[in-house]
Image (cartoon, rainbow, N blue to C red):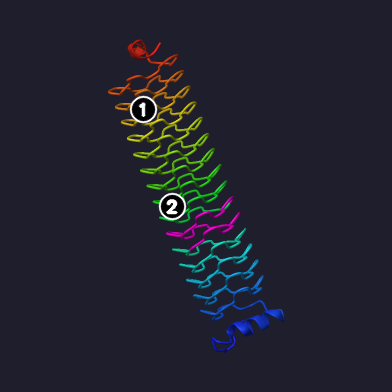
Amino acid sequence: MNPDPLSQRYAPQILLQRYRTGDRSFCDYPLSGVDLSQANLNQIDLRRAQLIAANLSHAKLVRANLTAARLCRADLHNVTAVEAIFSQADLRAADLTAANLGGAVFAAANLTGAVLHRCDAIASSWLAANLCGAQLTAADLSSATLTGAQLIEADLTGARLTRVIAGQAQFRSANLQQARLIRSYLNRANLRDANLQQADLSFAELRHADLTGANLMGANLEGANLSGACLTAANLAGTNLQASDLSNTQLNCTDLTAANLSGANLTGANLQSANLAQANLTRAGLLLAQLAGADFSQANLTDTNLLGSNLSSAKLLGVSLEAAILPASWQHYRQQYGS
C-alpha cells in the first residue's frame, strides 16, 4: 500500500492509528526523524520505509519486516526486534544498544559504525553484512551466522560468539579482546592484525584462517583446529594451545614464548625463526616441521616427536629432550641437551 499524502508531522500518529485498526503494510512510508519510541509495531511491514534518524527506542518490532529500510542514524536502543528482518537495510551509525535481536536477519545490511553494545543477538543472521567499525562490545552473538560478513576494525571486546558461524568473515584489525569464541567456526576467516588477547577460542575451527600479525597473547586455543592457518609474526606468548591442531601452519617469526603446546599436532608446520623459549611442547608432534633458526631456550620437548624436522641454527640452550624421538643424525643433541 502506498503511503497517504500526509505531512511529516502527522505521519507517526496516522501510522499508529492505522496499525491499531489492523493495517500492517507501510512499505515506502516516510518516517524520517519521527518519534515512535515505545510503540508496539510487531509484525509491521516497513520495507523500504524512510526512517532516517527516527526514534524507535524501546519500540516492539517482533517479526517486523524492514527489508531495505533506511535507518541510518536511527535510535533503536532497547528495541525488541526478535526475528525481525533487516536484510539490505541501511543502519549506518544507528544506535542498537541493548537491543533484543534474537533470530533477527541482517543479510547484506549496512551497519557501518553502528552501536550494538550489549545487544542480544543470539541465533541472528548477518550473512554478508557490513559491520565495519561497528561497536559490539559485550554483545551476545552466540550461534549467530556471520559468514562473509565485514567486521574490519569492529570492536567486539568481551563479546560472546560461542558457536558462531563466521567462515570467510573479515575481522581484519578488529578488537576481540576477551571475546568468547568457544567452538566457533572461523575457517578461512581474515583475522590479520586482530586483537585476540585473552580470547577464548577453545575447540574453535580456524582451518586456513589468516591470523598474520594477530595478537593472541594469553588466549585459550585448547583443542582448536588451525590446520593450514597463517600465523606469521603473530603474538602467541603465553597462549594455551594444548592438544590443538597446528599441522601445516605458518608460524614463522611467531612469538610462542611460554606457550602451552603440550600434545599439539605441529606436523609439517613452519616454525622458522619462531620464539619458543620456555614453551611446553611435551608430547607434541613436530614430524617434518621446519624449525630452522627457532629459539627453544628452556623449552620442554619431553616425549616430543621430531622425526624429519629441520633444526639447523636452532637455539637449544637449556632445552629438555628427555624421551624425545629424534632423527639418527640428531643423537648428539640428546647427549648435549637431554637424557
On screen, residue 63 versus residue 96, left or right, reads: right
**Residue 40 image point, x, y percent:** 66, 73
Task: Name which residue lies at 40% across and 37% down.
Answer: 236
Query: Could you say whether the residue bearing mark 2 is in a helix, strand or loop?
Result: loop
- Between 37 and 41, the residue placed more toward the observer is 37
Which mark is on residue 245?
Answer: none
Asked whether the residues under the numbered discs 2 and 1 touch, taking CB atoms below 8 Å apart as contact, a structural biologist would say no
First reached walking from the N terminus: tag 2 or tag 1 = 2
Lateral position of residue 243 relative to residue 17, left or right: left
Residue furthest out toward the right = 21
Secondary element at tag 1: loop
In the depicted structure, whether residue 293 falls above or below residue 52:
above
325, above or below 137, in the image: above
Span highlighted in magenta in the image: 115-143
Q: Amino acid at mark 2?
A: Gln
Packing grade of label 1 (10 A; few <14, some 14-19, many >=20) is: many
Say which residue appears at 38% left-offset and 31% top-offset: 257
Residue 337: x %, y % from top left:
35, 14
- Between the residue at mark 2 and the residue at mark 1, the CA separation in whole angstroms equals 32 Å
Residue 22 screen position, x and y as percent: 71, 79
On whether residue 43 falls in the magenta region, the answer is: no
Is 142 colored magenta in this rendering?
yes
* Left or right position of 191 against 31: left
Query: Which label was assigned to residue 277?
Result: 1
Residue kind at label 1, given as amino acid type = Ala
Q: Residues within 10 Å of mark 2 (few under 14, many from 20)?
A: many
- Which residue is denoted by mark 2 in the rendering? 170
Q: Against 44, is 255 above or below?
A: above
The residue drawn where x is 35% and y is 39% is 232
